[in-house]
C-alpha cells in the first residue's frame, strides 16, 4: 500500500545515523510501484530499496504445527483439552485458519464448564464452531443472503 513518496522517505530514514529497523510484509509479486510511472519491481518495492532488504519467506502452518500451537495455547491458558479434540481443532484450523481455531478454545472451555466436564472434548468444540463462524463461512452466508441487507 506504500507509494513512491513513502519509499523515498524510508530510504532516506535508513541512511540516517540512527537508522530505524523497518519490517515490511507483502504478498505482492512483480507489480507496479504505486505512485510511479508504471515502474514494475518485485513486491512493488523500488529496486534501490529492495537491495537493502533481507527477505524472509513464510509458508502457511501445517496441520501438525497448528496442533502444536493450539496445545501450547491451551497449556498457557490452563485449558485442559483431550487429544482427539486437539486433533479435531487442528483439522478445523487447517481448513479455516489458526486464528479461528485458537479463538474457539475459550468458548469451548466455557461450554465444557457449563456441562461440568473436566476437559474440552470434540463435542464442545463442534458446538462452539456452530455458534461462531470463521471468516470464510461468514462471507459465504453474507453473499447468499445479500438481498436481505441494505445496499
Image (cartoon, rainbow, N blue to C red):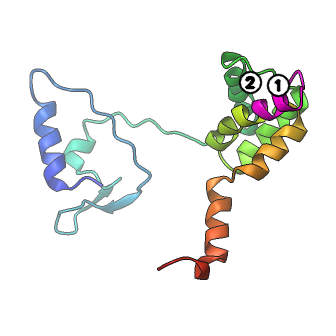
Residue range (magenta) = 109-119
The reply to whether dot 1 and dot 2 touch (C-beta < 8 Å) is yes
Tag 2 residue:
71
Distance in Å between CA atoms under marks 1 and 2: 8 Å
Residue 8 is situated, as x and y percent measured from the top left of the image, at 13, 46
Asked if residue 97 is positioned above or below residue 71 in the image, the reply reads below
Which quarter of the picture shows residue 94?
A: top right
Tag 1 residue:
81
Which quarter of the picture shows residue 53?
A: top left
Residue 105 is situated, as x and y percent measured from the top left of the image, at 72, 33
Q: How many marks?
A: 2
Q: Residue at x 11, y 30 (%)?
A: 15
Q: Residue at x 69, y 53 (%)?
A: 133
Q: Residue at x 25, y 52 (%)?
A: 2
Image quadrant where one finds the N terminus: bottom left
**Counting residues from the N terminus, which is met first, the one under dot 1 or under dot 2?**
2
Q: Residue at x 64, y 61 (%)?
A: 138
Q: Secondary structure at mark 2?
A: helix
Q: Secondary structure at mark 1?
A: loop
- For the residues carrying marks 1 and 2, which lies nearer the camera in this image? 1
Residue 17 is situated, as x and y percent measured from the top left of the image, at 9, 21
Amino acid at each position: 500500500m506504500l507509494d513512491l513518496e513513502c519509499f523515498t522517505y524510508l530510504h532516506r530514514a535508513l541512511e540516517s545515523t540512527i537508522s530505524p529497523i523497518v519490517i515490511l510484509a507483502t504478498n505482492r509479486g512483480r507489480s507496479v510501484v504505486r505512485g510511479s510511472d508504471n515502474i514494475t519491481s518485485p513486491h512493488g518495492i523500488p529496486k534501490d530499496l529492495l537491495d537493502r532488504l533481507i527477505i524472509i519467506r513464510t509458508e502457511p502452518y501445517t496441520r501438525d504445527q497448528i496442533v502444536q500451537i493450539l496445545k501450547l495455547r491451551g497449556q498457557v491458558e490452563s485449558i485442559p483439552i483431550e487429544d482427539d479434540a486437539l486433533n479435531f481443532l487442528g483439522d478445523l484450523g487447517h481448513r479455516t485458519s489458526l486464528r479461528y481455531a485458537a479463538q474457539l478454545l475459550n468458548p469451548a472451555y466455557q461450554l465444557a464448564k457449563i456441562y461440568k466436564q473436566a476437559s474440552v472434548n470434540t463435542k464442545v468444540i463442534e458446538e462452539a464452531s456452530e455458534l461462531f463462524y470463521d471468516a470464510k463461512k461468514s462471507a459465504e452466508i453474507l453473499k447468499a443472503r445479500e438481498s436481505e441487507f441494505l445496499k
